[in-house]
Amino acid sequence: MTERRTKSYGFIGSMEYIDNTYDEETRKRIYSSVSPQVRDFMGTARKEQWAPPLYCSELWRGIVNVHADPAKAREQLVKCGRNTGAYATNTYLRLLLKMLTAKMFAKKIPDFWARDSNFGKITVGDMGEMKSGRLTLSFSELGSYPYFGAVCEGWFAFSLETMGLKQLKVA
């Protein structure tokens, strides 16, 4: 069986968010909570490098653990996802997002996932619902990937806003 892997831009984008959001003491609390493997990876990670998805989850767990209020923790995870979207979206992809329609973007979502992860699947729901401002995405075969939902929500919100669809709410 192939080990689950995902591109490291999510990991690096999450570290960037932590570094830019939290004070030194809080950053130390977050980073000290990760495994030695993740700590080692922090110094060598590159955007296009493959890594286990649980490396991201360890960072996200650190974010959750520094917030006593679960709603605040979730809000920070969504913001982390937005930051990751901004980090992952290079100049070329930003231009592409501005040219795509929402329907074209929705059709490409499974391809984006397959390009950047070797596990899991995304299924796009009824495209006709987009007329009423709704798009349903179903994730399957993810295995254990704690906090992915909230971070993913932020990533999609960033992407849709980049496309000029600021009125849509991602949930």
Image (tube, rainbow, N blue to C red):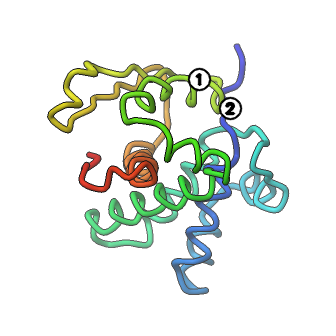
Query: Which numbered dot is residue 2?
Result: none
- Depth check, front residue: 39 or 105: 105
Tell me residue 47's x, y (percent): 75, 49
Tell me: 86 left or right of 70.
right
Give the residue at x 43% y 28%: 104
Query: Hey, what amino acid is under mark 2?
Result: Arg
- Depth check, front residue: 46 or 98: 98
Few, some or many residues within 10 Å of mark 2 (<14, 14–19, 20+): some
Q: Is residue 107 above or below residue 167?
A: above
Tell me: 97 left or right of 70.
right
- The residues bearing labels 2 and 1 have C-alpha atoms spaced at a distance of 7 Å
Secondary structure state at the residue bearing disc 1:
loop
Few, some or many residues within 10 Å of mark 1 (<14, 14–19, 20+): some
Q: Are marks 2 and 1 in contact (CB under 8 Å)?
A: yes
Tell me: 42 left or right of 116.
right
Looking at the image, can residue 15 be seen?
yes
Query: Which numbered dot is residue 5?
Result: 2
- Upstream in the sequence, badge 2 or badge 1? 2
Query: Hey, what amino acid is under mark 1?
Result: Phe
- Depth check, front residue: 26 or 104: 104
Q: Is residue 58 above or below residue 62?
A: above
Give the residue at x 47% y 37%: 100
Quadrant of residue 3 within the rendered picture: top right
Quadrant assignment for the N terminus: top right
Quadrant of residue 12 within the rendered picture: bottom right
Query: Which numbered dot is residue 119?
Result: 1
Tell me residue 65's x, y (percent): 44, 66
Give the residue at x 56% y 58%: 86
